[in-house]
Amino acid sequence: MAVQKWRVAECDVLIKPGIQSRQLLWPKNSPESQATITQVTMEPGSVSERHVHAHSEQIWIVERGEGFLLLGNEQTEVLRAGDIVRTPAEDIHGVAKQRTGAARLSRRDGSAAKLLSRLRHDKIGHGSSCANWSAP
């Protein structure tokens, strides 16, 4: 695999109501990669519902704003700028944005182990498929 370089402004942005997910590194721009990196912006009141990823862990870095980490058993924890959250594969998780101010999160998916090709499409949104998202 050769070194790759591109600009953030060139990356695809997937959209759901109140949520934009900029695909910094994903199969479309780096098919040989074993990880994905996305930058997620959530508008006030938006929610990424509780869900699981069967084959990958997910790491969130809260860049700005506040919200709530949604966990299994209806548990929640406050998220603030500077927080880092690691969610192992098969653990229930989601994010809810408070009703004021936008939030920005960086999300990194994958692991050092070789990932299944299916995993690359199991990164985004409320389930197991990129098909739930649309380009602007």
Image (cartoon, helix red, strand yellow):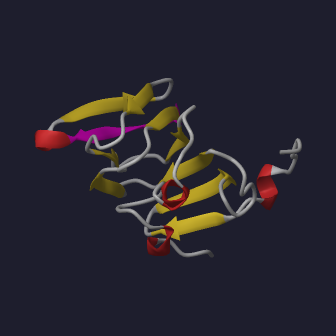
Q: Residue furthest left?
A: 73
- Picture coordinates of residue 10, whole percent (x, y): 80, 60
- Left or right: where 1 falls relative to 126: right
Instruction: Identify which residue is drawn at 50% across, 68% down.
Output: 130
Q: Is residue 64 magenta?
A: yes
Instruction: Identify which residue is drawn at 36% across, 40% down.
Output: 89
- Left or right: where 124 falls relative to 25: left
Q: Is residue 21 magenta?
A: no
Which quarter of the image is occupied by the N terminus?
Answer: top right
Q: Magenta residues?
A: 63-71
- Picture coordinates of residue 116, whole percent (x, y): 51, 52
Tally of marks: 0
Instruction: Identify which residue is drawn at 47% across, 58% down.
Output: 124
Which quarter of the image is occupied by the C terminus?
Answer: bottom right
- Picture coordinates of residue 46, whole percent (x, y): 37, 57
- Picture coordinates of residue 41, whole percent (x, y): 53, 51
Q: Camera-side residue: 62 or 5?
A: 5
The prevailing secondary structure element of the residues shown in magenta is strand
- Residue 126: image quadrant is bottom left
Instruction: Identify which residue is drawn at 39% across, 63% down.
Output: 128
Q: Camera-side residue: 102 or 52?
A: 52
**11 relative to 105, above or below:** below
- Left or right: where 33 falls relative to 67: right
- Left or right: where 76 falls relative to 56: left
Q: Camera-side residue: 123 or 42?
A: 123
**50 relative to 74, above or below:** below
